[in-house]
Amino acid sequence: GGSAVGQAIAVSFAGYFFYLTRRVAGGLIVPAVIHGMFDFSILSGAVAGDATYAGSIAAILAYPVVGRHPARASPPHRAQRRASPSYSLPPAREPTST
């Protein structure tokens, strides 16, 4: 029903966030830890019921911390290396006379 559409949108945003976290962190450790915190906060909040649960905010508080992580310099894409003026083939060898 209608709640499934909302859930699909929320999961899509979460997946995109975890993908961006992986790109920024340069590995899987940081997004895996945040994903675990996210799941733990959801499950803990479900157990607590309607009462206000402070743990449900843990994953949200982690987002700005990850956002401050400096982006790693990734190696240029193969097409960018070819288009670069510094990328060239080695010079051809002169034929040797015998």
Image (cartoon, grey):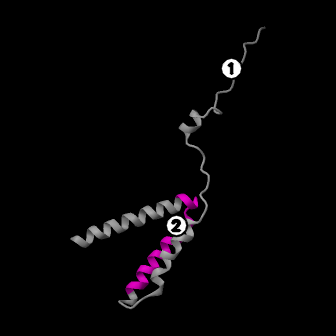
Q: Is residue 24 magenta?
A: yes
* Residue at x 47%, y 64% (from the top left corner): 18
Q: Amino acid at mark 1?
A: Ala
Query: In the image, residue 10 lies at what x, y percent?
Result: 35, 68
Judged from this view, the residue extending furthest toward the bottom is 51
- Whichever of labels 1 and 2 marks the residue nearer the N terminus, that label is 2
Secondary structure state at the residue bearing disc 2: helix
Amino acid identity at mark 2: Pro
For label 1, the crowd category at 10 Å Cα-Cα, with few meaning under 14, some 14 to 19 and many 20 or more, is few
Quarter of the N terminus within the rendering: bottom left
In depth, the one of 3 and 60 nearer the eye is 60
Q: Which residue is mark 1?
A: 92
Residue at horizontal 43%, vertical 84%? 44
Residue 82 picture quarter: top right
User: In this picture, is 98 found above or below 18?
Assistant: above
Give residue 41's position: percent from left, percent from top: 45, 80
CA distance separating discs 1 and 2: 48 Å
Main secondary structure type of the part rendered in magenta: helix
Mark 1 touches mark 2? (CB < 8 Å): no
Residue labelled with disc 2? 31
Helix, strand or loop at disc 1? loop
Left or right of 37, for residue 48:
left
Q: Tag on residue 57?
A: none
Q: Residue at image x 45%, y 64%?
A: 17
Looking at this rendering, what residue extends furthest in the top direction? 98
Q: Image point 68% across, 26% down: which residue?
A: 90
Q: Any magenta on residue 28?
A: yes
